[in-house]
Image (cartoon, rainbow, N blue to C red):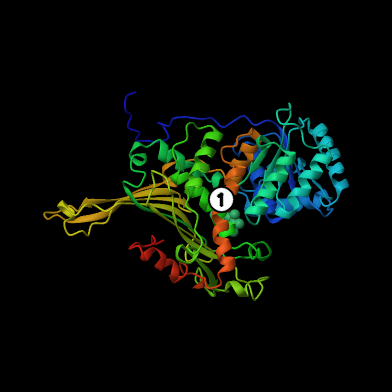
Amino acid sequence: MAACVAENPVEHSYHIAQPQAVPACTVVIFGASGDLARRKLVPALYNLRACGQGMGHHEFAILGFARRPIAVDTFREQMRDAVAQYSRLELDDKCWHEFAERLDYLGGLDQPAGFDRLRMRLEQLEATYGLPPNRIYYLSIPPEGINEAVARLEQAGLIGRPGAPHFSRVVVEKPIGHDLESARETNRSILKHFAESQIFRIDHYLGKETVQNLLVLRFSNTIFERMWGARNVDHVQITVAESEGVGSRSMYYDPSGALRDMVQNHMLQLLALIAMEPPVSLEADAIRESKLNLLRALRPIAAGEAASQVVRGRYTSGTNDGQPVRGYLEEQGIPGNSRTETFVAIKGFIDNWRWAGVPFYLRTGKRMGARESLIHIQFKDLPRILFNRAGVLPANALTLRIQPDEGFSFAVLAKQPGLGVTISPVRMNLRYQSEFEGPVPDAYERLLLDVMAGDHTLFVSASFVEQSWAFVQSILDQWGSDYSIPLNEYRAGSMGPEAADRLIQADGRQWLTL
Ligand code: BG6
């Protein structure tokens, strides 16, 4: 094929896959009175339906299911406020009205009889709106409620066989388990009632547009993939920095901490996507297999090494956006004797042919001085010849910005115009926002549509969940048994504890400045 110079990338785009057909269905949100339903799920569903303004007009009804009985009108009012506050698209009265007609509510999630009522209400809704009995059960409930919920769904005859003419699918939110053992237990108990093909385990990072773009960037640009590995790469950094504190989530966060909350899922997903081998095809199973293999090659933090390869930290009072903020221990609902980490940095290695000997530095934390997620590939130094005889020229680097300013930049060296030879680092910078037009769907919109379409590509397999817990568990075990491993303090608004700087500086490297 003739090479084509795309001056305007949109004019010269290549459609590889169209959005998939989405059958009509009903989404049951378990835990509909919770935070996730309000902030993410209902706004995402509103955006998907929003009178054709959204990403297409999809036929579905929504049934909120929670413990407390509340009037449907009250639920609709609450969700209206939530959409007004959190939706990507502005709330429009006409769209809202149309959406709200299909929004229903049922209490009784904590009672066995509640599930019989659920069946009846579903049949009623389907008859009213002429919907086929395609059902999605979105479990936005605490992990300890999952086993019981899936068992009761089965007892109430609400789970169809895989391959039946109409689908029954279950969506499971993180955290899946609290440790390796409970993750296995949760997987086992869901698999007792649903087949793997009916289960969708969400990691919302996989729905982010820029995370999906990692695969396109790697596998449709010859220049990068040929450079990807120990021969050319000095090291890789993955940073997910948040400026928010723990907020009102102390009940969930304090028993979890940053390692469970961010590393076990989002960070290891990013690591797998950036470092995995090319999948044999774009099929969901092939991509999931490649990711799993990468994780299998991630070297466990061996006994005794957590002290030198992992740094944990906790924020003290400081500032956020110039405003004074409390330290973690002063946050509402945090016990005074808490030992929970709000920051983790890890130095890891991938023991495979491609990455042998290349350090991967991961860091994530709350109340840091920036809100930014990125992956930084630092290439190897130039040889000390020609322009670099003095050994001072910086090496090339590729920085993939996941949020908030999505895009990537490639650091290269160029000659400054002039009579002498002066070399300057310059950045080739792509910002998606200025390069591409059109709306960017929220991660949950994309993922909910994929569940409706039955596409598993952006969902997490049971094996990946367990493999990622196995890695995290080796650290948890050491933190749990070796009390000499410090919990380092860092000021809110800083970039984490000094010990994290020392972790990377000990290897003669630096964290990227955000
Ligand atoms: C969630 C964590 O999974 O991800 C939160 O529980 C974290 O603690 C959030 O703040 C980060 O997501 P995002 O999309 O804001 O980067």
Of residues 503 and 75, which is closer to you in this image? 503
Vertical order, 231 against 286 (above or below) = below
Which of 312 and 429 lies nearest the eye of the viewer?
312
Q: Is 3 above or below relative to 87?
A: above
| Residue 203 shown left or right of residue 363 in the figure | right
Residue 466 is situated, as x and y percent measured from the top left of the image, at 60, 48
* Residue that numbered label 1 is attached to: 468
The residue that appears at 49% across and 39% down in the rendered structure is: 290
Disc 1 crowd rating (10 Å Cα; few below 14, some 14-19, many 20+) is: many
Quadrant placement of the N terminus? top left
Up-down relation of residue 329 to residue 260 (above or below): below
The amino acid sitting under disc 1 is: Ser
> Is residue 84 in view?
no
Residue ranking furthest to the top: 1
Indicate left or right for 50 with 115 as reference. Answer: left
Q: In which quarter of the image is ligand 1?
A: bottom right
Q: In this view, does 102 lie to the left or right of 51?
A: right
**What count of labels does the image hold?**
1
189 relative to 324, above or below: above
